[in-house]
Image: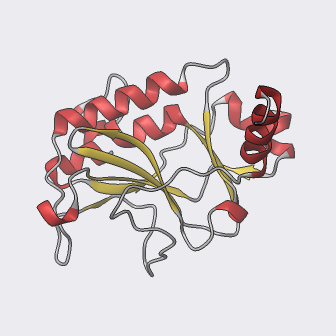
Amino acid sequence: MPTILQILAVGSYAISTGALALTPPPGAHIQTCYEGETSALHCYNGEGDTPQDVSVEDVAYVGAKLREWGRGADGGRFLTMPAENTPDCAEWSIFTYQSVLALAKHIDPNVHTSVLYEDIARTVDGGESASDEDKAKAIIGCEKSGGSLGVLVNETDPAYHTEDYKRAGYTPQGIIIKIVSNVPKEEL
């Protein structure tokens, strides 16, 4: 029987090497690049789209919780998607709440992307005290249809200009956030 130290050592190794990964929820699109998928706001209510029937209140809640999580550390918390861990436009589940599944998709396999959760939250809900105009530019502006949008990066945030961030070779470009239904596809 392994000792607690052996278990911790193996767990630490798995985490540090990336061997431990979040498993995507059933139905999530994994490692799929789509031609023409960009960081521009795309609401899932156009021709060929499937409206997601998400609750706008749930979308707002997800934005608030992502913001709260991001502010839980000095300098802010980052979502980091290194190129080697996100081949072929990998998607990671970042938050689930009632009708909403929030995904981060790495759309540029040539860069190591790292963005603040604060910026992800603004991408979802338009900002903490968002005006109607701000909301219209964010995914929440897609209302119940859901949608996707490149992270709205606050490039003046000091967190993006630290020596550690620069030394790691990160860029804030290359991630889109998707708000989709948390209901299994069979039920849509």
Residue 183: where, in percent of width, then height? 20, 53
* Image quarter hosting the N terminus: top right
The way the protein has been coloured in the rendering is secondary structure
Looking at the image, which residue is at 15% across and 41% down?
A: 55
* Residue sticking out furthest to the bottom: 35
Asked if 174 appears above or below 119 in the picture, the reply is below
Residue 19: where, in percent of width, then height? 70, 54
Residue 39 visible in this rendered orientation of the protein: yes
Residue 188 visible in this rendered orientation of the protein: no
Looking at the image, which residue is at 69% across and 56% down?
A: 82
Residue 39 lies left or right of residue 160; in this view the side is: left
Asked if 55 appears above or below 67 in the picture, the reply is below
Looking at the image, which residue is at 22% across and 38% down?
A: 98
Looking at the image, which residue is at 50% across and 37% down?
A: 119
Q: Nearer the viewer, residue 43 or 101?
A: 101
State the count of labels.
0
Asked if 61 appears above or below 84 in the picture, the reply is above
Which quarter of the picture shows residue 47? bottom left
* Image quarter hosting the C terminus: bottom left
Which quarter of the picture shows residue 16? top right
* Residue sticking out furthest to the front: 1
Residue 165 lies left or right of residue 185; in this view the side is: right
Residue 187: where, in percent of width, then height? 12, 60
Residue 117: where, in percent of width, then height? 52, 35
Residue 51 lies left or right of residue 15; in this view the side is: left
Which quarter of the picture shows residue 156? top right
Asked if 139 appears above or below 116 in the picture, the reply is below
